[in-house]
Amino acid sequence: MNPQYWLVKQEPEAYSWADLVKDGKTQWTGVRNYQARIHLRSMKNKDFVLFYHSVSDKKIVGIAKIVKEAYPDPTATEGDWVCVDIAPFKPLKNPVTLETIKSIPALSQIGLIRQSRLSVMPLSPEEFSTLCHLGGITL
DNA sequence: GCCAACGTTGGC
DNA sequence: GCCAACGTTGGC
């Protein structure tokens, strides 16, 4: 089955790409939004995940991969929430800024812009490939 | 079931 | 620091 493509957001002060690289992999916990949960549950092993630094950085900085599919979020004290495990795959040679994303017509429909508060969102294969290209990465 | 109030996120 | 967008809560 073909991989799917996703984008996750995190404030670098809370958990950065560098933290992920240092840790080797991490549990993507703490998502408490129904729409984001739907996306977490749809993730499959080996799917690609672009890692976006929000707020202070506003750049996509790296590509991660799903290494464990959705399971109960150990940080959830109530409610039916899930997390996945992700591991770093490749850093972007050139981080792609929000400003750049906004300036590219092919990315005008991207969830990052259309639904700015959603923290886990799908990307179309075209969007993913455009972003990799902008990031200086050939897969 | 509606909606006002309130809290959070995240860009500017 | 401000504010728009959006989710949640609670009164009715």
Image: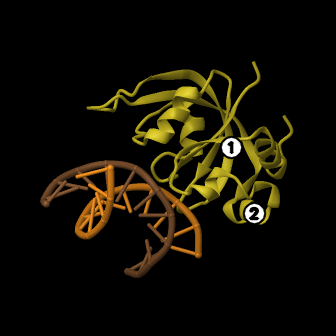
Chain colours: A yellow, B orange, C brown
Disc 2: CA contacts within 10 A as few (<14), some (14-19) or many (>=20) = few
Q: Tell me which label, 2 or 1, sits earlier in the chain.
A: 1
Disc number for residue A62:
1
Question: Same chain for the residues at labels 2 and 1, yes or no?
Answer: yes
Q: Which residue is mark 2?
A: A100
Q: Residue furthest top?
A: A1
* Amino acid residing under circle 2: Thr
Quadrant in which residue A137 is drawn: top right
Quadrant location of the N terminus of chain A in the rendered image: top right
**Drawn side of residue A105 relative to residue A86, left or right:** right
Residue B6: image location, x then y, percent:
24, 64
| Quarter where residue C10 is shown | bottom left
Nearer the viewer's eye, disc 2 or disc 1? 2
Q: Secondary structure at mark 2?
A: helix
Distance between mark 2 and mark 1 Cα atoms: 16 Å
Q: Secondary structure at mark 1?
A: strand
Marked residue chain, label 1: A
Coordinates of residue A3 in the picture (x, y in percent): 73, 26
